[in-house]
Image: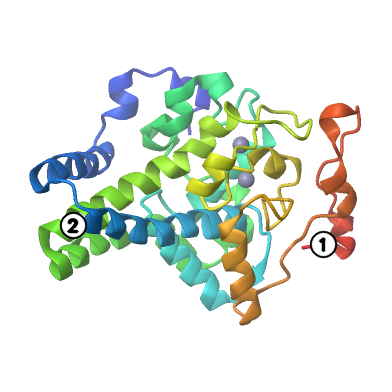
Amino acid sequence: MSSVADASAQSWRRIYFNALSIPFWGVHLLAVIGIAMLGFSWTGLLLAVALYVPRIFFVTGAYHRYFSHRSYKTSRWFQFVLALGATFTSQKGPLWWAAHHRIHHKLSDAPGDLHSVKQSGFWWSHMGWILSRDLEDTDLSRIRDFAKYPELRFLNTYWMIPPVFAGVVTFMIGGFFALVWGFALAQVMTWHGTFTINSLSHLWGARRYRTDDDSRNNPVLAVITMGEGWHNNHHHYQVSVRQGFFWWEVDATYYVLRAFAAVGLVWDLHGIPEHVRADQAMSSDDDAGPIASDVAQSTL
Ligand SMILES: [Zn+2]
Ligand SMILES: [Zn+2]
């Protein structure tokens, strides 16, 4: 596995235009050319949004809050549903995604962070890191807790099957119109919606907590990404299932997970200890990071 410094220093052609990036750019072209051919349609836009929402939920609720941070618990069968749903978003497999993300938190904005704007520039942090063939391997030592499940290892290897299946089924049900709006545009929105958290969320917004990185809180990004825009909150206390720490910080993923908990699909949602939430660290020298022993007193 190459170091991120070596990988990001490669040529544009090698990072952004390689064999595995052909489907990525192909879906972009399908969206742009398809909409140009079909013309604007409110029905099409509604279809794209309707199929964007479940996709972005699986990115944040599954890949991020479950597989990367274990912010709640669930059964083995529902864990598989979460992993399968997330592979439909075309962001590689669950073990790859979570293992890479854990490095982001370990080395946030320091050398070695796999997608840091500060270290490697905007475009690399936005999508270079995921398109680069030099970062394709999954470091299983970072994700041993989930790598022990054979069904997750299978999905991690064959992650491309679900999105291809989704494209074919969308076309069979709704023809070219559905393929363009419901598959291609929804997929492009999912990619760039997710990627804003790696790029813009470390550039644009307010910093409530004094974290060792450039993470920001941004209400616009929070709406677009179902709650991920409260990224400074998240870097301050990563294991919390909710990233909007206050009632006015809209966090749609958290609301869905609360609904899942209400019907018993998930449980042990990890809350925020009151003193961690109240810590206005930007105005003091205190450094309150995640503290596992606080779980018992945490609030949801
Ligand atoms: Zn995270
Ligand atoms: Zn971050």
**Which quarter of the figure has residue 255?**
bottom right
From the viewer's side, name the closer residue of 142 and 159. 159
Mark 2 or 1 closer to N-term?
A: 2
Query: Residue 65: x percent and y percent?
Result: 61, 56
**Which residue is at 57% across, 20% downward?**
119
Which quadrant of the view contains residue 66?
bottom right
User: Mark 1 belongs to which amino acid?
Assistant: Thr
Residue bearing mark 1: 299
285 left or right, relative to 36? right
Numbered label tally = 2
Identify the residue at image location x=58%, y=26%: 203
Q: Which quarter of the image is occupied by the C terminus?
A: bottom right
Residue 91 place in picture, x, y as percent: 40, 48
Q: In front here: 66 or 194?
A: 194
Read off the residue under disc 2: 179
Residue displayed at 38% across by 54% down: 89
Residue 113 higher or lower than 173, as above or below: above
Where 291 falls versus 29 (above or below)? below
Q: Nearer the viewer, residue 183 or 157?
A: 183
